[in-house]
Image (cartoon, rainbow, N blue to C red):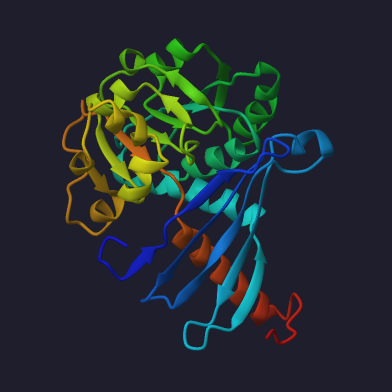
């Protein structure tokens, strides 16, 4: 994406007026990887009570040479993996090397994936966590224990004071973390805001931080940056694509005291990339329904 070899199509993300659900489409085309398609799905907040995952999605892959449908891939598990991978990549490239305390804001289904991916990037020793519903925290604590990390449920203010890296992964529509709670040198990965109106952090935090995004257009329209831009605290030009850091055309973090923030809205190309790998592995192993489509 940062090199211009791949691009995302405009996102459709709407409240459907039924079951409090959000539904939409993310798609794109990767010229280099020859991945073409879209993910259809959304968020059904009542699914947990039915024994289902709140996020439901399916990825459609097409042959870029003919336009024929080449695969249908279930997107629930893969969405969880790619979302966690995205924040993990931001930690790898933007967090301080000596980060020891990981802060988790949110304890839903996605949080355990986020935790497992984050610990791959730094030698964390402790996890501090807060969730709007405290009764959900023990599941996250169990994963931390499995990973050999100390775990503590804390207030939002204490989380900001202790954490070297913070991951926000909620479906909030109001700021849960305020700018003056964050200590210098922190890296924040905002992963929950992916719809107009959603919000997890104080817009003033984006003014304090150096801001990076998976895709700038999505960041300012449906991501965490939508609020800071609307209030005139930052401009589109103040946001850097994280791909530029990965490719070495932007230095990323430039000091130990710098606050860095990754606005991860989730892009269609991530879904196509992970679904393409899953489809390839399925074909190699003779798994799935390989009937010709079209």
- Measured from the top left, where is residue 153 in percent x and y? 58, 16
Comparing 95 with 224, the one in front is 224
Question: What is the quadrant of the C terminus in the image?
Answer: bottom right
Comparing 289 with 184, the one in front is 289
Residue 94: image quadrant is: top left
Residue displayed at 51% across by 88% down: 66
User: Is 20 located above or below residue 201 in the figure?
Assistant: below
Q: Is residue 119 visible?
A: no
Q: Would residue 154 appear left or right of 141 to someone viewing this image?
A: left
Q: Is residue 40 visible?
A: yes
Question: What is the quadrant of the N terminus in the image?
Answer: bottom left
Pick out the residue farthest to the front: 17
User: Is 270 located above or below residue 160 in the figure?
Assistant: below
Q: Would residue 54 appear left or right of 113 to someone viewing this image?
A: right
Residue 282: image quadrant is: bottom right
- Measured from the top left, where is residue 84 in percent x and y? 51, 46
- Total marks placed: 0
Residue displayed at 53% across by 13% down: 154
Pick out the residue farthest to the right: 50
- Measured from the top left, where is residue 74 in percent x and y? 68, 61
Residue displayed at 62% across by 73% down: 279
- Measured from the top left, where is residue 248 in percent x and y? 20, 56
Q: Would residue 274 appear left or right of 145 to someone viewing this image?
A: left
Comparing 190 with 125, the one in front is 190
User: Is 214 located above or below residue 234 in the figure?
Assistant: below
Residue 290: image quadrant is: bottom right
Residue displayed at 55% across by 71% down: 276
């Amino acid at each position: 994406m940062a090199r211009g070899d791949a691009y995302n199509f405009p996102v459709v993300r709407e409240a459907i007026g039924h079951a409090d659900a959000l539904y939409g489409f993310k798609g794109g085309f990767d010229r280099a990887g020859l991945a073409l398609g879209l993910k259809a799905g959304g968020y059904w907040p009542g699914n947990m009570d039915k024994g289902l995952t709140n996020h439901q999605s399916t990825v459609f892959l097409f042959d870029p040479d003919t336009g024929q449908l080449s695969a249908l891939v279930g997107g629930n598990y893969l969405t969880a993996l790619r979302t966690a991978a995205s924040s993990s990549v931001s930690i790898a490239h933007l967090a301080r090397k000596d980060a020891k305390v990981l802060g988790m804001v949110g304890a839903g289904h996605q949080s355990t994936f986020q935790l497992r991916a984050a610990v791959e990037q730094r030698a964390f020793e402790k996890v501090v966590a807060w969730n709007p519903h405290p009764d959900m925290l023990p599941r996250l604590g169990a994963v931390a224990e499995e990973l050999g990390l100390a775990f503590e449920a804390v207030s939002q203010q204490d989380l900001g004071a202790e954490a070297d890296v913070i991951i926000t992964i909620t479906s909030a529509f109001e700021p849960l973390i305020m700018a003056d709670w964050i200590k210098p040198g922190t890296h924040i990965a905002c992963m929950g805001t992916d719809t107009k109106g959603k919000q997890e952090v104080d817009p003033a935090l984006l003014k304090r931080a150096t801001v990076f995004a998976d895709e700038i257009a999505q960041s300012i329209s449906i991501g965490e940056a939508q609020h800071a831009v609307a209030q005139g605290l930052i401009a589109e030009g103040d946001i850097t694509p994280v791909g530029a850091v990965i490719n070495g055309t932007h230095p990323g973090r430039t000091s130990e005291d710098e606050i860095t923030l990754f606005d991860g809205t989730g892009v269609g190309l991530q879904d196509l990339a992970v679904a393409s790998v899953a489809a390839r592995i399925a074909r190699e192993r003779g798994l799935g329904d390989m009937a010709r489509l079209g």
